[in-house]
Image (cartoon, rainbow, N blue to C red):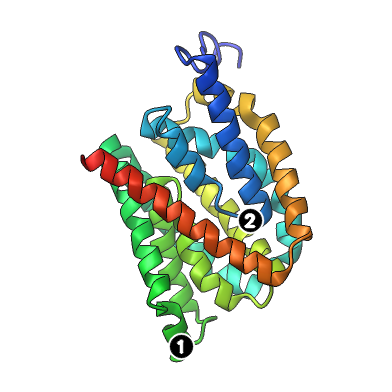
Amino acid sequence: MTEFFSGVMPFDGIEWWVLAALAATHALGCFIRGAFGFGSNVPIVVISAFLLPPHHAILLALMTTLAAQIQLLPSGFRTADWQVTKPLMAGLVVGTTTGSWLFSVLSPEWLVIILGGLIVFIILMDTICVVEKLVRHVDLRSRRLAAILAAIGGTMGGLSGAGAFYFLVVYLKHACPTPETLRGTNVMLASITMGVRLIALATLGFITPTLIVEGLILWPVAIAATWLGAHAFKRSSPGGFYIALQILLLCGAASLIYKGFQQLG
């Protein structure tokens, strides 16, 4: 074990103010995950990509939000809607594995452009009420529909490190009867996605000793911010929860679109 971590230089060459900005960014993301059960990676990845190379930003987000996810698992397990969760699992595993492989072969420039494009698609889908129209014609608890949506969302999340649940939550908020079950379902599905990504990226050689140590350095910030987010959720009303959720979606989309066009320019 000692040899595995020998020669590790976490955040090598990074100035103190960049590290402070990274800590604040990860705190913001983990607060969001604590409140909603998902959603931490979009703000973390988008802001961190201004401070680190895109691949590094995405991988570091995975390592720090792992702490948040472990913290949320007990409440997620208790409150998840398992009739909704179970049919989504297989699709998420297949999609996330595929997306993780695509992540390993794409250039940094294409990563941010695709991430922005995916969220544009999500917002357009919500704006023209695709799911609302779908509700009139299909059973939201259909296993086939769930598997298709999960595979698409998993591919998006595995590829970009963020955005899978910005897509799935549009479906989940109709399938789950209450904000509490929506949050619990998000937690359990995000845990599955995170586990698959860790295994796939470790197999592909992306999870290095340096990355592990960098993640552990930021874990105290992640744990504290997740706790604050979870307590903020308990104080929110159902109406306020869904309004905040829509604001979160729009802010995430706007920041990703900006980042994508910046890279194109």
Looking at the rendering, in which quadrant would you find the C terminus? top left
Q: Residue at x 53, y 64 (%)?
A: 246
Above or below, 148 relative to 233: below
Numbered disc in front, either 1 or 2: 2
Above or below, 63 relative to 249: above
Q: Looking at the picture, how far across and down is residue 57, in whole percent?
A: 44, 33
Residue under label 1 = 138
Q: Is mark 1 on a helix, strand or loop?
A: loop
Q: Which residue is drawn at 43% across and 61% down?
A: 153
Between the C-alphas of marks 1 and 2, the distance is 26 Å
Looking at the rendering, in which quadrant would you find the N terminus? top right
In this picture, residue 189 sits left or right of residue 151: right
* Identity of the residue furthest to the bottom in this view: 137
Q: Which amino acid does label 2 sit on?
A: Gly
The mark tally for this picture is: 2
Who comes first in sequence, dot 1 or dot 2?
Answer: 2
113 or 6, nearer to the observer: 113
In this picture, residue 49 sits left or right of residue 105: right
